[in-house]
Image: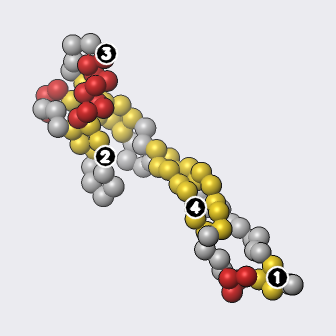
Amino acid sequence: MVFKFDEFSTNEGKIDCDGKCEYVVETEFVFKGKFIVKAENKQQAEEYVKKHCGLVIGGDIHSSLPDNEIDWDFNTHPEKNVISVKKK
């Protein structure tokens, strides 16, 4: 997803920022998938995922649960959402 912004602040016909301004682009990456958890009930399964599963940029999806109690199926490419674009 690429955004192009051709709007620059002008001051008597001159472009501010020497033609290129800095923008703050708030962005989120969403990884959708599922964990397959061995648990006694739904509440425990949800608690296990909240407490024991995660993802770190530059790392991998991980869990502190034993391998025989957890598995996962996630797309390795996230959905990218631009939340807002503001001139710095």
- Percent from the top left, x then y, of residue 50? 30, 32
| Image quadrant containing the N terminus | bottom right
Q: What residue is at 61 percent from the left and 70 percent from the top?
A: 88
| Res. 44 visible in picture | yes
| Snapshot quadrant of residue 38 | top left
Residue ID for mark 1 = 11
What amino acid type should be assigned to the residue bearing mark 4? Val
Disc marking residue 86: none
Tag nearer the camera, 4 or 1: 1
Q: Which residue is mark 4?
A: 25
Count how many numbered circles sit on residues in the image: 4
Q: What percent of the width, then of the height, locates residue 79?
A: 50, 47
Q: Which comes before the other along the chain, label 1 or label 3?
A: 1
Disc 4/disc 2 C-alpha distance (Å): 22 Å
Cα distance between the residues tagged 2 and 3: 22 Å
Which mark is first along the chain, 2 or 4? 4
In the rendered image, the vertical position of residue 55 relative to residue 50, given as above or below = below
Front-lying residue, 58 or 8: 8
Q: Give the distance between the C-alpha atoms of the residues marked 1 and 2, in whole angstroms.
A: 46 Å
Mark 3 or 4, nearer chain start:
4
Amino acid at circle 2: Leu
| 5 relative position to 53: left or right | right
**Nearer to the camera, 62 or 76:** 62
SS at circle 4? strand
Helix, strand or loop for disc 3? helix
Rendered view: 63 above or below 76: above
Name the residue tied to disc 3: 42
Q: Residues within 10 Å of mark 3 (few under 14, many from 20)?
A: few
The mark that comes first in sequence, 4 or 1, is: 1
The quarter holding residue 34 reads: top left
